[in-house]
Amino acid sequence: MIKKILIANRGEIAVRIVRACRELGIKSVAIYTDADRHALHVKKADEAYNIGSDPVLGYLNAHTIVNLAVASGCDALHPGYGFLSENPVLAEVCARRGIRFIGPGPHSIRQMGDKVQARQAMIRAGIPVVPGSDHNLENVEEARALAARIGYPVMLKATNGGGGRGIRRCDNEAELARNYERVVSEASKAFGKPEVFLEKCVVNPRHIEVQVLCDAHGHCIHLFERDCSIQRRNQKLIEIAPSPQLTQAQREYIGKLAVRAARAVGYVNAGTVEFLLDEDNQFYFMEMNTRLQVEHCVTESITGIDIVQEQIRIADGLPLQYRQEDIQHRGYAMEFRINAEDPKNSFLPSFGRITRYYAPGGPGVRVDGAIYSGYVIPPYYDSMIAKLIVWSLTWEGLIQRSLRTLDDMVVYGVKTTIPYYREILNNPEFRSGRFTTGFVDAHPELLDYAVRRPPEHTVAAISAAIAAHLGI
Ligand code: ADP
Ligand code: ADP
Ligand code: MG
């Protein structure tokens, strides 16, 4: 039985994993760099160890981290998302050192982390994929020939990419020629691997992904889909479960397809199969993420299942506690990625001290965050500082509750995406539940909001305090 888990991550996801451990009666161990000395995950975990002065490298050294897991008496390790979560070496080192890796085996991570190999595996399993490369591109001439065959627009993509980076749309041959070296160089810089491939660009698609859970005993189920079409620069901003854009028949079809995909590669643990849905209602496999996802919380809200706890049980060798027919969904949930960014200034990161933070509350509200009043957001990491997850029984109710909750959540000291989300929620196209991955680019006017003054109640409270002090 797993008794103590090292969390090889930071920020909100490390806090999330600590919470799952606590409920299961499992001890948690945090790691932190000097820059993260005052981070929330360090305060929440049962134990915490400093892994060095470099703000980033400590979180990326598989050997040091696994040594620490062994030395601190852990029997398992959770990688979270980002950092080493999709690095097969971490899973391998864990296996060698007798630490259970809370995720799939290194083979699955390697196979699905390579988008070309993943496409091949899906084609073999009879899953529809976007037309495109069956191997990495050798050079721009090969790219040109393939693009001519499948037709423009095409997407040039880093084979080992993630986080929305290393992806460029090319509308014609000239753009393809211009972008080729760029994507190769982005891929080399961001992922240490220069390989790129090409696929047809699905025009006006919706991003629909399915959460799967597979145990080591051959059981595999899905927890329905999430709609992540609201993106900027191929990165998700708002995620919704279930998708307001699918019929029940489509929901059942895509769930089954995802389970088939996971089974085809012998997948074990939690994973997400991402699809694009085109204008003709065709689904195409895009990639599989072999880890916990940022937006897993919306699925938890509609199904009541704790995905992190299930991950831990699966890694412990336990069979799934649910059959497919036990899984129900109720209402709608929406997650807002609260990023310390200035949407008005091309989403430029806005780091620094959070002078005041008021957490939202009330019915149907969950916050997974890493912030508190006085916390200084270090400049070295992802700009996502919290996730706001709202649930309601109906789509209309969800919109209203989300607007109320965004007003309820107050972060002073840094710029955030909160005011921008208010504009999105008021947009009729968004409210109609019909939107594509082009939504953000198609609505630059939503960035024209007025920056709000402190809410009236704050002003009133300050006036009252001054009045009391002056005795008037
Ligand atoms: P999700 O698919 O869970 O929504 P994202 O794609 O937004 O997640 O990625 C989650 C985090 O992991 C982000 O901080 C992102 O920058 C990082 N990330 C994802 N994939 C990679 C990768 N291959 N290499 C480096 N960082 C990555
Ligand atoms: P990452 O690993 O960075 O998450 P994905 O392959 O999942 O990369 O793509 C990220 C996003 O880029 C998708 O959600 C979608 O908006 C867009 N995208 C990727 N491939 C295509 C495509 N072939 N056609 C249209 N949009 C695409
Ligand atoms: Mg993706």
Image: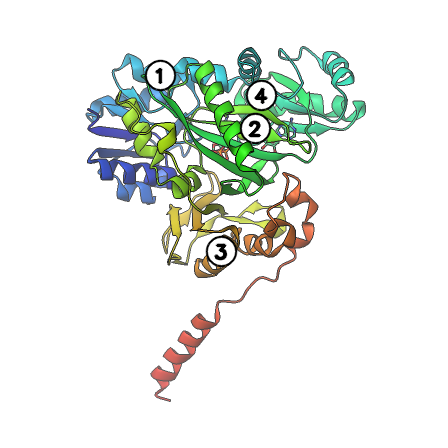
**Are there few (<14), some (14-19), or many (20+) residues within 10 Å of tag 4?**
some
Mark number, residue 275: 2
Of the numbered discs 1 and 4, the one sitting upstream in the chain is 4
Q: Which residue is mark 3?
A: 397
Q: Residue at x 51, y 52 (%)?
A: 416
On screen, 341 above or below 210?
below
On screen, 451 above or below 54?
below
Dot 3 falls on a residue whose secondary structure is: helix
Q: Are marks 2 and 4 in contact (CB under 8 Å)?
A: no
Q: Amino acid at mark 2?
A: Phe
Between the C-alphas of marks 1 and 4, the distance is 37 Å
- Dividing the picture into quadrants, the one containing residue 143 is top right
Between the C-alphas of marks 2 and 1, the distance is 24 Å
Of the numbered discs 2 and 4, the one sitting upstream in the chain is 4
Asked if residue 450 lies left or right of residue 263, the reply is: right
Between the C-alphas of marks 3 and 1, the distance is 39 Å
Question: From this viewpoint, is residue 154 visible?
Answer: yes
Q: Residue at x 28, y 22 (%)?
A: 319
**Are there few (<14), some (14-19), or many (20+) residues within 10 Å of tag 3?**
few
Q: Are marks 1 and 4 in contact (CB under 8 Å)?
A: no
Dot 2 falls on a residue whose secondary structure is: strand
Mark number, residue 188: 4
Q: Which residue is mark 1?
A: 218
Q: Residue at x 47, y 14 (%)?
A: 264
Asked if residue 28 lies left or right of residue 420, the reply is: left
Of the numbered discs 4 and 3, the one sitting upstream in the chain is 4
